[in-house]
Amino acid sequence: MRDKLLSVLLGGAIVGVASTLIAKIPFLGGCLACLGYAGAGLLTVWHYTNTHQLTLPGGQGALLGLLSGAVAALISGLLTLLLIHWGFFADPIATLEASGQLDQMSPQQAEIALRVAQVLSGFWGIVLGILIGGILGLFGGILGAATFKKGASETPSSEPDVL
């Protein structure tokens, strides 16, 4: 089985950085960033099929898309945390507190809202992003496998699929 890791990392890295920046566009940025995770699957399958001049079955494309979407979400999440820490992006907790929205809630609701925001702006937010990015990337990988056909099909072998 040909090495797929380079294609996964390349697609994930490009889309991870792009999604981090695109997410800051007002109104539609979040939607476009999520759509980018499907683009990670497309980009990964395109790179792999173009490099090796072959056609992938849908399942292989789905696997590549899943992995590249997860990598993109991981990179985007870590990059976002770094940019918040360095002061380039606003701290979501401070923004929530300064918005005045917590003043319109009961003290219990405000406490729950702050706890949820703290959880989702850290480790568990990245984990959730990896799950969502992987699922969206999976669909992009399937679409890429159906779209980017280059020569002979990759034949399944008795060896396990190793990246």
Image (spheres, grey):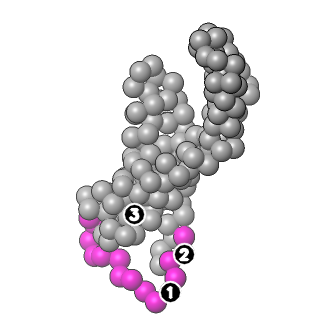
Residue under the image location 35 percent in, 77 percent down: 154
Q: Amino acid at mark 2?
A: Val
Along the line of sight, the residue nearer the viewer: 139 or 51:
139
The magenta span reads 149-163
Q: Amino acid at mark 1?
A: Glu
Residue at the disc numbered 3: 62
Residue under the image location 74 percent in, 28 percent down: 85
Say if 150 sits above or below 154 in the image.
above
**Labelled pair 1, 2 in contact (Cβ < 8 Å):** yes
**Local crowd at mark 1 within 10 Å, few (<14), some, or many (≥20)?**
few
CA–CA distance in space, label 1 to label 2: 8 Å
- The x and y percentages for residue 37 are 44, 46
Q: Main secondary structure of the magenta part?
A: loop
> Helix, strand, or loop for circle 1?
loop
- The x and y percentages for residue 121 are 65, 34
The first of marks 3 and 1 along the sequence is 3
In the image, which disc is placed on residue 162? 2
Q: Amino acid at mark 3?
A: Ala
The first of marks 3 and 2 along the sequence is 3
CA–CA distance in space, label 3 to label 1: 19 Å
Say if 72 sits above or below 162 in the image.
above
